[in-house]
Amino acid sequence: MCAVPARSAPLAAHPEAALVLLPPSAEMAAAGRLRRRLQLAVPRCWDCSPRRWGSGVSAAGRVRAAFLRFFQERHGHRCLPSAPVRPRGDPRLLFVNAGMNQFKPIFLGTVHPRSKLAQYKRVVNSQKCVRAGGKHNDLEDVGRDTYHHTFFEMLGNWSFGDYFKEEACSMAWELLTEVYEIPKDRLYVTYFGGDSSLGLNADEECRDIWLCLGVPASHVLPFPLKDNFWEMGDTGPCGPCTEIHYDHVGGGRNAAALVNQGSPDVVEIWNLVFMQYSREVEGNLLPLPQHHVDTGMGLERLVTVLQNKRSNYDTDLFTPILDAIHKGCGGPRYEGLVGEADIGAVNMAYRVVADHVRTLCVCITDGIYPGLSGAELVLRRILRRAVRFCSEVLHAPPGLLASLVPTVVDVLGDAYPELRKNMDQIADIINENEAAFLSSLERGRRIIERTVQQMEPCTDFPAEVAWSLYGNLGFPLDLIDLMLEEKGMRLDSAAFNELALEDAKRKAHGLQAGQLEGADVHLDVHSLAQLQSNNVPVTDDSPKYAYTLGQHGQYEFSPCQATILMLYRDQSLQEEVGAGQHCGIILDRTNFYAEQGGQASDRGYLMRLGQQDMLFPVESVHLCGGYVIHEVTAVETLRAGDQVQLFVDEAQRLACMTNHTATHLLSFALRHVLGDKTEQRGSHVTAERLRFDFNTKGPVTVEQLQQVEQVVQEVIKRNEVVHMAEVPLTLARRVQGLRTVDEEYPDPVRIVSLGVPVESVLIHDSEAAMHTSVELCCGTHLLQTGAMEDLAIISERQLAKGISRVIAVTGGQAKQAREVGQCLAMEVDSVSIRMKQGSTSIPEVQNLSKEVGQLTKVVASTAMPQWQRKELQTILKALQRTANTAIKKLEMQQAAEKAQSLLAKHCNQPVIVDTVPVDSPSILMKVVNQLCDKSPGTSVLLLSPQASGEVFCACQVSKNCLPMFSAADWATAVCMQMEGKAGGSCVVAKGSGNAKGMQGALTTALEFAHSKL
């Protein structure tokens, strides 16, 4: 049977219109009418064939352009540019991993009604996507086969409450078979076959649409929930989907048995999702008020089909990059081999490098740089994986990866022009990170080889060494495993995981690694006296300020060579410390910053000169009496007199510098907004955030928080120079407007001035310092404020009366906090609009109340601008009051109606026992109360069966019947009959039980009451 929508009620306007069943003889006629209907709407002069463009655009580029033009020009879609791969306002995502990510607010109903997003009805685009890290993670599979990627392009068309199944399927079939001219006999379509456990029938509507489009019945296949029902998450929009699969072999065979079986010969090319349900917290499905269409087709796989290839890497999306790799490394050409046939994993290396360099180009362009956490850490891992395959498998010279950037831009630049603008920056960042990793890679290899030589045969590789490689050299764990596998060894995973767990616990408590054991490395008074009596000079730590801005705006930190003067362990100075011992190292000079002035200490490592294969991780740094103590656990014997080279963790240092300069700027902004009497009461600066305590008359208002951020942002935009100089303390204290805290300062003292040279603020009677931030500070700072990018205050609270504490973040964290804040503001606005509509349904208002409660928790716990948090909390508090009032009012109305009906039914009865349908125990109790109020001499017990099988019970005993008749005893007797429980007082009680015993419970209720009266 062929079913098509009734012509008088097209699916675009009525997605749930009844289906008209046609006899078999009418099937072809119906399909013909449907095709003619579509053709009538198409301009005859229109042509989106990939052949339309000249040779200047790559074949893959023509395929992409044809997709966009088809939906834009023929079917009235708005063509949108790809969103950046850095997610906007979604902290749960590391990267944008699907085309629908940017449209989530529409699907979730949280889009602001006045926003541009809310105006979209039909949309098409080609979305940049990255799947690496998190739930969708293809990183480890890339290179092992010919179709996995970390970066890919998702072609998609969307309908937001506009067209639905018929149009979506028709458009897809038309594009594939008429525009791309894919043979129809090679295409198979799947549809949702239903799920009895959820009460969902098979999507026969979708099936019949395909049949009416001319797809043979043998090519239209049902599949279960796991294959053909798409869900955004555990809750939220969902619905059946239909997939289009392509048979690479063809030749007239029937490949239906291979669909969804993991066969490389029959692959899915397009998924059309019909969002028509919402999965609730309880797991049930409710129809969506608006139906949406979300389709996704991987460009790489489509191009593979259209270019008659069997591997994505054989298409012109990759062949130019593979050719450039061959030219750069000079090794054997790429042959497309996999598995055992790929001798030496050369072909795998080609695929890894080609894929990863595409990902690096796109991510760096979109503002994600290799780093230490989140998406940045994943990208660093991708870069280092590519570098290792370049150097160790392809034996390519350094710089190969960056040399591929122009080729990637040639391939992708027409579709994503932002790549062309950032080509030099991409190459520079890749080169810098590659150079750092190659150096670390060589040191790591020597460490592994040296450790293996010292080990007994057939033993596990020590976890402590692996942890040092992982934590200090940034070695991805999989690379350590691969290196050990090459040597026939394995890592002691249990011990490694234990170290990782300990480190996580330390971080959770705000402690740096090793700090718990570090109490014994603080010099005691006797050791200090001994050092001084032995004329051991204090540590020269001026190299910590030895950094400059490079040509491309990057910070360059000068290396530092030093001599071990003394070692400190077990509260005594020592000339030598053995392997495995925890100790403090005193050097003659250092570029490490010791924790002071509220700034966290540097981390990093040191190496002995001439012994480049041994790392000594520096866990923390302390300053005692002018001596800088570097806390380490010796991995080999250390002696006084050893020459060492020091390496600061540059990323951690730069983050601390950024946040320390931000602290000065925040202090200035607070004084500017709150008044000159605002004084600092404490601060703490780490790589992650900054904390600032200050005196205040009361909580800072929303407006004041906004003003403070605006003052900071203005200075950031001006990219003011940060001036620093050491001056005599007496001279420094004469500066007008100088900000100081209650602590001892060294003499000479370091002055940090934002935007005004130190010489200018030192001029007698100069007021220059009154209009900017000028402070005495020994910390490390940015050289220009622009590198801060942004500052967001994410917390403000009173520690005690008159003392407030703010916490702020900078850079990418600040940007993310603002995006999240905007996202939550839209959700709150959506709830507010729905609340104002004034529903008369108790369940609807209760759901709104529940949603307000959940949003209140999220707003309270999420990192976002504090001024925005306060605004949203005020709105949510009012919404919760409104919801509670509405629920109470509706419950009272419902209770009054039920009570009046029961009173009429049981007129002037001393005992009322009955059942009544209500939505909650509170309404049931209100019905009981109102009955007793209107009939004071009556005792009432009501049961209310629920759809879940539970039965609510509520009762009230007339005061005339006390003390012989107890409500608690009455409810208990009744609920026990239903295998439930009850409780209350002698006057009122409530409980619940199982519906199976309800009839017996009603009898028990009457018998119990009569026995007491």
Image: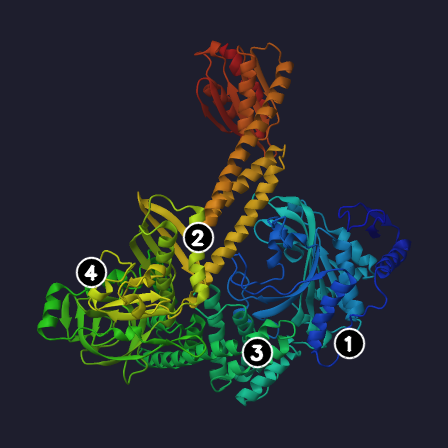
Q: Residue 287 at what x, y percent from top left?
A: 67, 44
Q: Secondary structure at mark 3?
A: helix
Q: Which residue is mark 3?
A: 354
Number of the label disc, if any, that sits on residue 722: none
Direction from residue 344 to residue 106 in the image, left or right: right
Decide which of 543, 623 is in the foreground and name it.
543
Q: In this image, 375 relative to 664: left or right?
A: right
Q: How many marks?
A: 4
Q: Amino acid at mark 4?
A: Glu
- Is residue 903 in view? yes
Task: Report the Cα–Cα distance between label 3 and label 1.
Answer: 27 Å
Q: Are marks 2 and 1 in contact (CB under 8 Å)?
A: no
Residue mark closest to the camera, 1 vs 4: 4
- Going from N to C along the chain, the mark reached first, 2 or 1, is 1
Question: Disc 2 residue type?
Answer: Gln
Q: Is residue 575 above or below residue 10?
A: below
Q: What residue sits right under mark 2 in the picture?
A: 707
Give coordinates of residue 942: x percent, y percent. 56, 22
Q: Comparing marks 2 and 3, which lies closer to the viewer? A: 2
The spot of residue 751 in percent (x, y) is 28, 66
Of residue 623 and residue 746, the one placed in the foreground of this image is 746
Q: Amino acid at mark 1?
A: Arg
Left or right of 527, for residue 335: right
The circle drawn on residue 51 is: 1
Report the residue at 57% width, 53% height from top.
Answer: 233
